[in-house]
Image (cartoon, grey):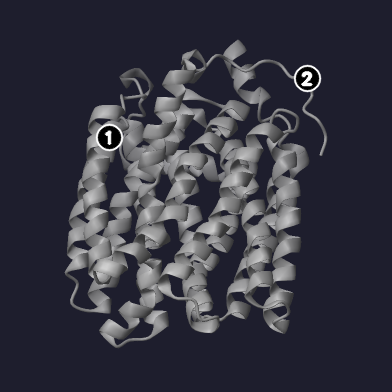
Amino acid sequence: MTSVDTAVAPRPVMPGDLMTPRQRLRLILVLGSLIAVGPLTIDMYLPALPAIVDDFATSSAAVQLTLTGTLIGLALGQLLIGPLSDAVGRRAPLIAGTALHIIASVCCALAPNVTVLGALRVVQGLGAAAAAVIAMAVVRDLFTGIAFARTLSRLLLVMGAAPVLAPTLGSELLRWTQWRGVFAALAVFGVLLMLVAVLGLPETLPPAQRQRGGPLHIARLYGGLLRDRAFVGLIMVAGLAMAALFAYVAGSSFVMQEQYGLDEQQFGLAFGAGAVGLIAATQGNVRLLRRYTPQRILLVALLAGTAAALVLVALAVTGFGGLPALLAALWLVLAATGLALPNAPALALSRHGEAAGTASALLGAVQFGVGAVAAPLVGVLGNGAVAMAAVIAGGLASALLALLVVARPDQLAAVEAEPVAVALH
């Protein structure tokens, strides 16, 4: 890594720069609770996947498609909600999406078969997408550049509690109820989220800054984003890194419970331990940003993550070291991914503050869309440790290739300076 050039021109003052530390903390807690709805919706029922297979007398691949349905809903929902939030503001789409999530969660708890459950998970994902895209857009409304990456890293600390706690919460719920109770709990969380959205989040997009126009204008916005090669490369990086993460999410319950014999509670603890590495890396990123550029951190993280993933494949194929060695390699992969995930979005969204909601939507759609492909791919390849490791390695290696060939780190050095140049005209 090379140190950040101290001669870089200062960026323009953003609304978030004027906030007190106490106000920033409150903002992070509110936005963290909003972003948490996605990971909770995805992860909380993971310990119950084998039980759902038995209850519906179906295959593990069919049940994994319910996870894919959620990811598809999250991807499509962001494409719709992002431009909408740029046009009407952040609060109204957030409240409507949260209400949809609550209704879908209740219906999931009553699903009669795996097909209906999969369809309802798509709707549930659509609702959860509102919280995800609005939270990212709000951060971009208030911050830019390295300040955005630092704030996002802090936000990921709060958000990181969701994947740590979700499987553990799910496994504890399964002590007292069946898998349907997990979805009832998600409905209750949705109600709490609604209160947070209504009471704790002010509007951050003034009417004067909102995008006007119909579908043609939205198409032009997306067209402008897709013509930005660096932006496209960075969202590819973010999506492929997320694919590696979702391969772990989709395959870990079957690998740890069926292949290595852990029970639901032990799996929850093992899954949570891996997420600790992810969280630790996101917080280490804040310190690294004081000395290094986001693009340098991203490059080194993907190099390290790809190397760790190849070791993971070797351990899965040979069985060397058993589950402890496999978990250690997974921890390194998750730590590297935790460094990549804040910096790729920060670099991408810093380029398009004029359409933060739309840019955030496209970023999120790519992340969850690619994840939707990775999740069932693990099942298609056999749901074993080798299948999970192979998809993880493929995702991280492809992310590294996208960074080097499409985004090109040496072309990202001016990202911090661009908003300054615009502001000085």
The amino acid type, in three-letter code, at marker 2 is: Thr
Q: In this rendered view, identify the residue nearer to me: 175 or 350.
A: 175
- Circle nearer the N terminus (1, 2): 2
Query: Which residue is drawn at the image coordinates 71% and 35% (left, top)?
Result: 288
Vertically, is 316 above or below 397? Answer: below
Query: Which residue is drawn at the image coordinates 68% and 58% (left, top)?
Result: 332
> Which of labels 1 and 2 is toward the front?
1
Vertically, is 282 above or below 312? Answer: above
Q: What numbered label is drawn on residue 6?
A: 2
Q: In this rendered view, identify the residue nearer to me: 10 or 151.
A: 151
Which of the 4 image quarters holds residue 305? bottom right
Q: Determine which residue is flagged by label 1.
A: 197
Query: Which residue is drawn at the image coordinates 40% and 57% (left, top)?
Result: 166
Residue 216 percent location from the top left of the image? 36, 41
Label 2: which secondary element:
loop
Q: In this rendered view, identify the residue nearer to me: 407 or 336.
A: 336
Q: What numbered label is drawn on residue 262?
A: none
Using residue 78 as the reference point, say whether residue 119 is left or right of it: left
Which quadrant would the C terminus be assigned to in this image?
A: top right
Q: CA distance from mark 1 to mark 2?
A: 39 Å
Q: Is residue 362 visible?
A: no
Label 1: which secondary element:
helix
Query: Which residue is drawn at the image coordinates 46% and 60% (left, top)?
Result: 369
